[in-house]
Image (cartoon, rainbow, N blue to C red):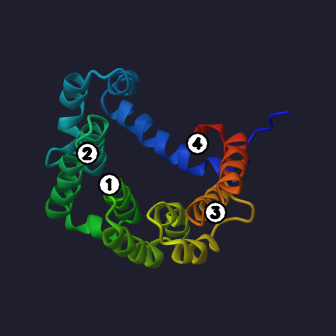
């Protein structure tokens, strides 16, 4: 029997989707997400670029959207450059935990353990829960002791914590245990599959 995950399990998914809703409203309709996810990137960029323009009330959102467009096309470096441009254009963003969390995600994609560690250190100061959710990032990069310590800040029984433990088991050569752990985590939160 499949049961619905609790709200703590799906918080990241909700946060990820909420900016799409905000961006869709800012551009006048729900079509923005459809453009992104249908691969119509040039049209999506034309819709999002004005959101990142000086004077836009949702400038950060515009930059995040432009960076996401780059990532969806396999250009993480270009996406990271846009995040760094945002920090130059809107220096206050360096005090925004979300900016650091998104930037750490881009660095994770490049296997940049030092960069992810630095981002997590800042996140610990700004938003400990967001830092704890990056335990899986550190586990993916093989820093299992750090990941385990960071995962202590997760809600008991969290899917992210279970996935971290499974990654540690995999790297320790306990393949069966790792696969069982990942399967169990995915049953609890199918969005991970």
Q: Nearer the viewer, mark 2 or mark 1?
A: 1
Quadrant of residue 32 within the rendered picture: top left
What is the number of the mark on residue 188? none
Q: Residues within 10 Å of mark 3 (few under 14, many from 20)?
A: some
Secondary structure state at the residue bearing disc 2: helix
Residue at 43% across, 64% down = 141
Q: Nearer the viewer, residue 7 or 176?
A: 176
Q: Which residue is mark 2?
A: 67
What is the number of the mark on residue 192? 4
Please state the horizontal and vertical placement of residue 90, each as a whole percent of the image. 19, 61
Mark 2 or 3 closer to N-term? Answer: 2
Q: CA distance from mark 3 to mark 4?
A: 18 Å
Give yes or no for contact between labels 2 and 3 (Cβ–Cβ under 8 Å): no
Mark 2 or 4 closer to N-term? Answer: 2
Q: CA distance from mark 2 to mark 3?
A: 33 Å
Q: CA distance from mark 1 to mark 4?
A: 18 Å
Q: Which residue is mark 1?
A: 106
Quadrant of residue 118 within the rendered picture: bottom left
Mark 2 or 1 closer to N-term? Answer: 2
Q: CA distance from mark 1 to mark 3?
A: 25 Å
Give yes or no for contact between labels 2 and 1 (Cβ–Cβ under 8 Å): yes
Quadrant of residue 34 within the rendered picture: top left
Q: CA distance from mark 2 to mark 1?
A: 10 Å
Q: Which residue is mark 3?
A: 169
Give yes or no for contact between labels 3 and 4 (Cβ–Cβ under 8 Å): no
Q: Residues within 10 Å of mark 2 (few under 14, many from 20)?
A: many
Give yes or no for contact between labels 1 and 4 (Cβ–Cβ under 8 Å): no
Q: CA distance from mark 2 to mark 4?
A: 22 Å
Is residue 33 rendered to the left or right of residue 83? right
Please state the horizontal and vertical placement of residue 94, each as a whole percent of the image. 28, 69
């Amino acid at each position: 029997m499949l049961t619905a995950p609790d709200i703590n399990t799906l918080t990241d998914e909700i946060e990820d989707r909420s900016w799409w809703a905000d961006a869709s409203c800012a551009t006048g309709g729900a079509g923005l997400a459809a453009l992104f996810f249908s691969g119509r990137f040039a049209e999506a960029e034309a819709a999002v670029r004005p959101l990142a323009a000086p004077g836009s009330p949702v400038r950060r959102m515009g930059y995040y959207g432009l960076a996401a467009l780059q990532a969806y096309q396999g250009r993480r470096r270009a996406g990271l450059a846009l995040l760094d441009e945002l920090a130059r254009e809107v220096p206050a963003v360096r005090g925004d935990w979300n900016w650091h969390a998104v930037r750490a995600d881009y660095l994770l994609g490049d296997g940049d353990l030092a960069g992810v560690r630095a981002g997590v250190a800042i996140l610990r100061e700004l938003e400990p829960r967001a830092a704890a959710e990056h335990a899986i990032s550190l586990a993916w990069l093989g820093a299992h002791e750090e990941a385990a310590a960071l995962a202590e800040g997760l809600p008991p029984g969290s899917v992210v914590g279970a996935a971290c433990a499974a990654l540690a088991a995999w790297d320790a050569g306990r393949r069966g245990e790792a696969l069982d752990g990942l399967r169990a985590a995915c049953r609890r939160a199918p969005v991970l599959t």
